Image (spheres, grey):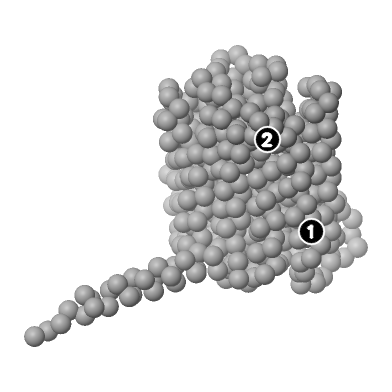
Amino acid sequence: MAIEKTNLTSPALNSADETRGLVLMFRSLRSRHFLLFWSGNFLSNIGTWMQNLALGWLIVVTTNSPFLLGLNGFLSSVPSLFFSLLGGAIADRLNRLKLMIYTQTSMMLLALLLAALTSFRLVTIREILLISFLSGLASALNNPAYQALVPDLVEREDLLNAIALNSAQFNMSRAIGPTLAGLALGSLGAAGCFYLNSFSFLPLIIVLESIQVPSRLVHDGSGVWSAIVEGLRFVRRNPLLIILLSVPAVLSLFALPFVTLMPSFAKDALKVGASGLGYLMAGAGLGAVVAALTLAARGDVEHKGRYIFASAAAFSLSLILVSQARTFWSGFFLMVVCGATMVGALALTNTTLQLVSPPELRGRIMSMYNLTVLGFAPLGNLQAGAVAEALGTRISFALGGAICLVYFLTLLALIPRLRGLGPLRPATA
């Protein structure tokens, strides 16, 4: 009598496969330095998201102006428009760890100043806008070094996993931070959230002081401007890189401003308070975490271009549907979808750019990614805030989503022609 081997071996095999899949999902954390870097950024980002939500709510309840929300988003991100490329050139020429220590310390002190002014009831919209601008300036110089450090902390074969886990921690903080802020606003007030954000920078600063990265050859003595031009020329010679960079650019201009306008949307369209706003943002973070962990578990993804464009199109459609939400729960569910599809587009674009960047140009190429994600955001926030002020946040969300949807469906239709531009592969300068 034959014995069905599958009946005897399947449970053990399934258990082994599940364990192996879990190990693979978190394999880049085997690097002690990356684990410390990942953990420090996770705590810091929780504090940042707490401050973002509390600051947005403070602006809404004191001014009741969607335009001022958009203006605050504009000023916090406009430095990235002008200084991202400079930050990338600096990151390729100086010690990236020390650069991050300086910028993180600056952001910590600015958060502490905002907390103190709010505690003593001295803060006005002018101080809020100024501190947002200065924090954005420090962030613009910080982000290229942050992005460029990741490949220095893990093996090349673990890079996609590391970037996906980095995206996961960022979006876990997006889920946790606003939820905590929504709860803390009632008991600690906005100032309490700002104090907690200031303290959250300390673990990351300590980590940056302790980790080590391989020494690298600093470029020749040419000036910073020459270094920026060199990076731009490299991208110009690779048309597919231009197309990849257009994905976050279009999203930043027309879709991503929904994050800035969510306090107004939650208060006026869905009629929920600070805690409801926190849960809505947590929904986006939850979807983003699921998508990021899925990417981390899968490893490399075939047909990257098709996956990126399809995810961006799905995100655009979900934003249109969010604009039509009438209840908290429908809004929450759609925010989960928004978060998942947004990460599918942005995380894989980030990974692909990292993989094809020569090490000596990585800081500059990632600065161009940051330029599109963060540098174009002020323009997006300003236009979205103006549309919301005139026509309402629902129209602002729907219009931005529609423009993005048309663009990404067009790219999906053109994929056969895009293949003729050449494959995406590791390149040399």
Q: Is residue 305 left or right of residue 30?
A: left
- Residue type at numbered disc 2: Asn
Where residue 230 appears, as percent x and y from the top left, is 78, 56
User: Which sits in the foreground, 112 or 303?
Assistant: 112
Q: CA distance from mark 2 to mark 1?
A: 23 Å
Which label lies toward us, 2 or 1? 1
Q: Which circle's residue, 2 or 1, is located before the other in the chain? A: 2
Most extreme residue toward the left, as rendered?
A: 1
Where residue 406 appears, as percent x and y from the top left, is 47, 34
Q: Is residue 98 left or right of residue 369?
A: right
- Residue at x 61% of width, y 46% of height: 173
Q: Which numbered disc covers residue 206?
A: 1
- Residue at x 81% of width, y 62% of height: 209
Most extreme residue toward the top, as rendered?
A: 390
> What SS does tag 1 mark?
helix
Classify the position of the N terminus by image quarter: bottom left
Q: Which numbered disc covers residue 247?
A: none
- Residue at x 60% of width, y 52% of height: 169
List the residue tagged with mark 2: 52
